[in-house]
Amino acid sequence: ARLNAPGILAALDRYPYGCTEQITSKALPLLYFDDVAQALDLPDADNIKRRIEQAVAEVLTNQNASGAFGLWGPVEYGGDMWLDAFVTDFLSRARAQGFAVPDAAFRNALDNLRNQVNYYADFDHGGEALAYALMVLAREGAAAVGDLRYYADVKGDAFATPTAMAQLGAALASYGDQPRADAMFRRAGAALQALQGQVQEQIFRVDYGTNYRDAAAVLALAVEAGSTVVDTEALSAAVVTTNTLSTQEATWALLAANALIDRKGADGILIDGAPAKGPLVNVLNSTNAAPVVVKNTGPDTALTLTTYGVPSEPEPAGGTGYAIV
């Protein structure tokens, strides 16, 4: 309840560009927050199914014959493995939610990830794209369990980011290897702990990530995988923000919020006397101005309440460094 899911979803929807990463980032949360999108009256909110199907069609126009994806069109040769995994993750989740994804295109996407995993070079520090690809393949039952165990046992500390460690943990959890999964999630939690208080330079990362995105992804993946070895309360607090988020940060924050919706212990929030479940959007207008009574009776439960409105009178002129003359 601390995560401002409606506000993040609305902000994410306003991103203006149409590259493959942004199309995927804007569509992926709609798989889980369709009711919130409708309450916020986002574009095409009356038909979220059509909007997700359009996103699937749009990203597939940027897929080449080998199954790889380009940012602005099909790539001629090998593309960006992390982007390939991210788009295939979206397609996999969409299929699981009942959306139509062409079998041939999805099979090519999985084959592309499998081929890249098979030829992935050895590394002492890195593996961000490899971990994501293994997670997506494992969810579809297409990963080699021996590979997962090798990377956990031999290369577990070589993965460069907490997100990569958590993704390998999620892959192992998909195959029922919870001890190794928990070991990777512990590594991810420790890596996040080491990043606390560090100011991250605005530099390019091959996985499109930031420290904030890492925290949101570890939280989402650990809860989805049923792991209890990370401090979900501390991670939830870490991803509460009023700052502007990148598409990756917003998408993974929303995936974390979705994973936490049905979490045990997150109770005690009452809306007009009735238990609340998940993000709530309540639209008030001149014909529906009754106050909304929000009460939190949970001893360990926190919530975020965000209000938006239209001023009843025009705001006074103002500005910082600018003027209209």
Image (cartoon, helix red, strand yellow):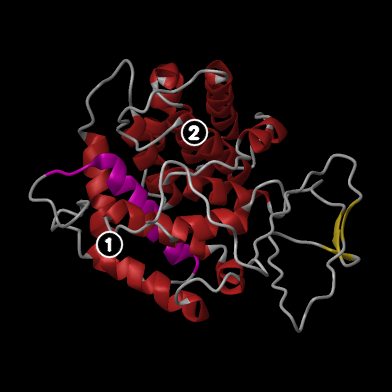
Q: Secondary structure at mark 2?
A: helix
Relative horizontal placement of residue 278, taking residue 254 as reference (left or right): right
Looking at the image, which residue is at 15% across and 53% down? 66
Q: Over which residues does the magenta segment extend?
A: 78-97
* Residue 323 in the image, given as x and y percentages of width and height: 41, 50
Looking at the image, which residue is at 66% across and 38% down? 236
Looking at the image, which residue is at 51% across and 34% down? 212
Q: Quadrant of the C terminus?
A: bottom left
Is the Cβ of the residue at disc 2 closer than 8 Å to that at disc 1? Answer: no
Callout 2, which amino acid? Answer: Asp
Q: Earlier in the sequence, mark 2 or mark 1?
A: 1
* Residue 97 in the image, given as x and y percentages of width and height: 50, 67
Between residues 93 and 17, which one lies in front from this camera angle?
Answer: 17
Relative horizontal placement of residue 115, taking residue 223 as reference (left or right): left
Between residues 233 and 176, which one lies in front from this camera angle?
Answer: 233
Q: Quadrant of residue 18?
A: bottom left
* Residue 30 in the image, given as x and y percentages of width and height: 50, 64
Q: Main secondary structure of the magenta part?
A: helix
Mark 1 nearby-residue class (10 Å; few <14, some 14–19, many ≥20): many
Callout 1, which amino acid? Answer: Val
Q: Say whether residue 131 is magenta.
A: no
Q: Quadrant of residue 215?
A: top right
Mark 2 nearby-residue class (10 Å; few <14, some 14–19, many ≥20): many
Question: Tag on residue 214?
Answer: 2
Looking at the image, which residue is at 65% across and 61% down? 308
Between residues 186 and 69, which one lies in front from this camera angle?
Answer: 69
Relative horizontal placement of residue 215, taking residue 149 as reference (left or right): right
Disc 1 target residue: 59
Q: Secondary structure at mark 1?
A: helix
Please tell me whether residue 242 is drawn above or below residue 290 in the rendered image: above
Farthest residue toward the bottom?
Answer: 287
**How far separated are the C-alphas under marks 2 and 1?**
24 Å
